[in-house]
Image (cartoon, coloured by chain):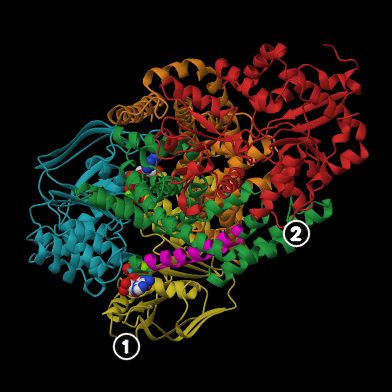
Chain colours: A red, B green, C orange, D yellow, E cyan
Amino acid sequence: PTPVQGSEQLQPVTYRLKWLFNVSVAGDLYTDATGIFRKNGLDVTTKEGGPERDAIKELEMGYADFGVASADQVIRARAKGAPVVVLAQLFQTNPLQWIYYPDRFTIHRLADLRGRVLGVTFGGNDEAILRTLLSKGKVGERDVTLFSVRYDYTPFYRKRVDIWPVYRNAQGVILADKLGREGESVAFLNPAAFGVIFVANSVVTAERTARENPDLVRRFIRGLMRGWTEAMHMDNHRAVLYLLQRHDPDTPRHVLDAQLAITRRMIQPTPEFSIGKLDVNGWRQTEAIMVKQKLIGSPVAIEKTFRPEFLIE
Amino acid sequence: MPLHRRIYQFLIIYFLGLSGLMLIKYSVGLSDYVIPGPADVWETWGTVWRRYMRDVVNTLLVAMVGQVISVFLAGLVGIFGRRATWLGNFIKVAAYNVQAYPIVALAPILFILLGDGIFTRLLIAAMICYFPVLLSVIGIMSEPVTEIEHFYRVTGRLRWQLEVKIRAFENLTKLTTVIAGSATLAFAGTIVAEFIAANAGIGYSIRIALYQSDLSKILVALFLIGIVLSIYQGLLEVLGRVVQRTWAGT
Amino acid sequence: MPLHRRIYQFLIIYFLGLSGLMLIKYSVGLSDYVIPGPADVWETWGTVWRRYMRDVVNTLLVAMVGQVISVFLAGLVGIFGRRATWLGNFIKVAAYNVQAYPIVALAPILFILLGDGIFTRLLIAAMICYFPVLLSVIGIMSEPVTEIEHFYRVTGRLRWQLEVKIRAFENLTKLTTVIAGSATLAFAGTIVAEFIAANAGIGYSIRIALYQSDLSKILVALFLIGIVLSIYQGLLEVLGRVVQRTWAGT
Amino acid sequence: MELRCSELSFTYPGTTIELFDRLSFTMGQPGFHALIGPSGVGKTSLARMITGDITGFSGVLETDGMQGLLYSYNLERLPGWSGVGKHLEKITPPGKHSLRDDLIEVFGIRSVTRARFSQLSLGQQNRVNLIRSLLQDFHLLIMDESLANVDEMTRETILLKIKDLFPDTFFLYISYNVIEVSKFCAGILVFRGPGKSPQAVTVPGQDYRIGRTLDKDRLEGTMLEVMNAAA
Amino acid sequence: MELRCSELSFTYPGTTIELFDRLSFTMGQPGFHALIGPSGVGKTSLARMITGDITGFSGVLETDGMQGLLYSYNLERLPGWSGVGKHLEKITPPGKHSLRDDLIEVFGIRSVTRARFSQLSLGQQNRVNLIRSLLQDFHLLIMDESLANVDEMTRETILLKIKDLFPDTFFLYISYNVIEVSKFCAGILVFRGPGKSPQAVTVPGQDYRIGRTLDKDRLEGTMLEVMNAAA
Ligand SMILES: Nc1ncnc2c1ncn2[C@@H]1O[C@H](COP(=O)(O)OP(=O)(O)OP(=O)(O)O)[C@@H](O)[C@H]1O
Ligand SMILES: Nc1ncnc2c1ncn2[C@@H]1O[C@H](COP(=O)(O)OP(=O)(O)OP(=O)(O)O)[C@@H](O)[C@H]1O
Ligand SMILES: [Mg+2]
Ligand SMILES: [Mg+2]
């Protein structure tokens, strides 16, 4: 598609992702690649995220105009007075789940976790989620063994740890593929299935941008959501795959294929679902969990940071 | 350098750094999330300093053992790799290559071979600390001290032990500087190891603080690391002087 | 040491290491996802070596610049910190403390202050590389060469430049050893920087491979790092000899 | 100007034997003075006290009004990064260029000025070091075996040249050569063996220089006197 | 055993002047031989060719049947970590303990055996170095200004002692002292100034030793011969 405006009139915008280029940013890449941003008069530089990156801080420093952050990051930032607002919620299901070998045991009820060795990233949001699951299932801390997780999956491979936190749509698929080749089947523990909602990636911007430049915000978020919607459409499956392969050459095509399918369900649970919708209850529960786990001192009234108006007419 | 001076110099540096951060914070008008305010840091200090202090001491103990191992290792490799023979070069190539591999890349292999726990932590600390010592040791060990060695060489008495002893003695100041200084590396190495591998120590606590995006905790950790390191470093230098005095008899 | 020998020695070391892994794999009966088999590694090699090679060269370029910066920095700090004056000690305390802070802990602060981009990557590489060079430089610079300096001192000619020149010249072998060896550290430092900060270079590729739990790719990366580093290291040593020859006129 | 030492006592820290025990002497006139005595008696130590490198002695050591006390010894080295000629050039104060060339010529090191210091023979090194000191502004130059590795003939040429060029300067020449010091020095401070009192006595020398004749008998008399004092 | 040099030519790499140009001499008998000549003529270089430290010369240099060629020079040092007495003990071969004690006594360093090498005076250092060499098994010992920093009386005692103890060994004594070499040496290889041919001539010396009397006139004759050869 050709841009409607000359590039000299495009407004430069920096967009900081939460993670490396992989399936979780498919829509972001797609929006940029198909020229949707340009059609909206924006010249967007999409920057990779990473474990040391924090989009919210970059908004404040002025290094970025828009960013992706998880709900717990947003809540934490608000608790410390950061002027951040939420524009849209990308993932409707948190991809952070636990992988396990179903032929060793299955998890029907949370009580099934009793006596298990549970992988957890201390300090990470999987810790908050896991602790909530345990307390919900009335499993005491002494009934399980918590195992500190790092880059390397060997303890899980060697079955010294029973469940291991992964991003369901990214590493989850890679591991399932790897293990599948050796005849091992895997299953995933999805906290949402037990009523524990912890919101993941959302699109954020600075309060000031929203206040002083509503038009820019509108053009950006609408473009982005349109891009995501198109990217998630089955018709564009091959085009998105192609795009992902270019940006994520380390993941084989068949794995990308499966990753995309799973991501689609997490972004858009039903074909009619309007991508980007803020799950207010989910956010409230996330906030409540964080208060309970003493990750923040007191509630921050998170709904006040929501700016859904830019998305809806 | 007397210990108290070392400490107050560290305090100056630390508070200069902190003031710089605050300057940025208030001039740009950043929230506590990006750079915490003094009140926030102070409050965090009150909450965590005891725990962090224990962590730092824990880390220090591992670092001390790691340093001993790595100085020993560097000595060995330096001594055997000092000659320009095939084996000497081979040892050197091996030593250099191991160093070039960032620990993060080797960590998975280490975990497979050793599992986690104290041993991996030690090994990583030693691996980070040994190389700089090695470089100095190789530099010193491969340079003959002709005026002393000549006699022993022509009379067939220059065993490698004597050669090493002579060269070490003649470069004692340099060696003690490097060894005392390598404490810093062992410390940093241990923290890195804890960061990627362990469930204890200040590195582990820093990782958690990072996940929580809690810069106040990191500032507290940096303060404690600096204090403890200054003291340790100071003690090592005293030790170095004692060694010099007793060995050189001056 | 001739370049080709350095390279085949590296190959021996690498394949020894690989064989060790395979030995463990087959003796304990580990599956391919824990330790990949030779076929898997070979296949991965075919797929990624070109891309990884470009990454390694990219990293090397940054490392070279980082090394120059850090040698320069170490020289400066070493020269100004060599005296046992208040300022000298202050500089030393500062230099040591900065080193003790693990990069991972400083990274968030660096990102806040500097943003991303090549500069941060360079800075981190330099910070990892500078300290070992500094230790040697301080050791060398703080030890007088009385037989040479005496005359200049009593005739009031011993400016700091001359003092530094004399001590550097008298310890040229040690200095070139350390500087050539520090290439290894700059390389490792750059990889670490890429691992935590960049979106290019072999460190970035290693990070992705780690997240994907792909040990084959890591083994390929380690191979390429080793080869490229051996060559760079070799060239630096030749350069060191050239410097020695031209300066010392021997 | 004069060099005056009175009641000087000194013991090296960590040792028990008193090196100097109330040593006194005076060198009242500029010129060539010698310090002679058995090895280990303390000549170098005394020299380094005069220049201030060794402190912690008791008694008085006065270098009355002297500016520029130089100490030159035979282990000194020049930096290795350029030829000795270049180094000499660098340390030549303005106006002393012709003096330098003169010294290089007379001291016989013209042929090696392009060589690095480490490539010189010992005697050549000694001479280069000495030239370097002579080019400075000084009132007293202590030559601690500065010519120990130079052959006798060259040494004689050098001593005569120095005396000719610097008639109004103090030199303290540390040497073992009884004939030489007797012949060239104006005053000879003879250190006597351990346990003797006084520790040192001053013997007048022949102070031979260009344009003077040397009386062989008087020289032998001085030599005898020196040897008697030492014994 | 004999030391034979014939048609030896050598130029230092990187220099243009030929240091040796078809130099020939022979030392056929054990005993005290001297190498004398102006500074920079090549004495040290020749010594280091004999010991094999310098190679790359043309011509023949034979140390026929000699085992143990030692080269001792006046810049050698002992390690600093213990007293010189301890170091001497360590390098004393079995059976030579009384020799060591004897040498320590006669050389006059008994009082400093507990000191570190760096605390010794130059002459003391020289003597310790020499003792160290003398305790070894050797057929030829080159003494390159080994006693340059020792006073004349002590030096005389030392030379006589050495000649007494090692009558059947070759010594090559590099020195500048015409009197000394004329008096103590059996043969004196005199290096002549640059451009002279032949480069060196051998003059027989007085070979004075304990129990012999010294004829003053013949000594002066030897001295004259040496000086004439050199000129
Ligand atoms: N740093 C020191 N510590 C202890 N004793 C020392 C030290 N330096 C010198 N001495 C001792 O002091 C005495 C005098 O030494 P000094 O070097 O002054 O002698 P000298 O007269 O110059 O002898 P030489 O003619 O051999 O050079 C010697 O016995 C020596 O062992
Ligand atoms: N490594 C070298 N490279 C070039 N020239 C050298 C080297 N070593 C010595 N020479 C030159 O060779 C000549 C002979 O030196 P050598 O040391 O043998 O003299 P020497 O007779 O021992 O003199 P001295 O009595 O002063 O010790 C000198 O002119 C010296 O400059
Ligand atoms: Mg002396
Ligand atoms: Mg010589």
Q: Give the magenta range.
A: B221-244
Identify which residue is drawn at 8% across, 64% down: E212
Report whether mark 1 lies on the same chain as mark 2: no
Point out residue E184 in the picture as x, y percentages from the top left corner. 17, 59
Say which element carries label 1: loop
Q: Residues within 10 Å of mark 2 (few under 14, many from 20)?
A: some
As drawn, D12 above or below A228: below
The residues bearing labels 1 and 2 have C-alpha atoms spaced at a distance of 79 Å
Q: Is D53 placed left or right of C98 in the picture?
A: left
Which quadrant of the figure has residue A268?
top right
Q: Quadrant of ligand 1?
A: bottom left
> Which sits in the foreground, E202 or A302?
A302
Q: Is residue B223 magenta?
A: yes
To which chain does the residue with label 2 belong?
A: B
Q: Quadrant of the N terminus of chain C?
A: top left
As drawn, A14 above or below D73: above
> Which sits in the foreground, A70 or A101?
A101
Q: Is residue C136 magenta?
A: no
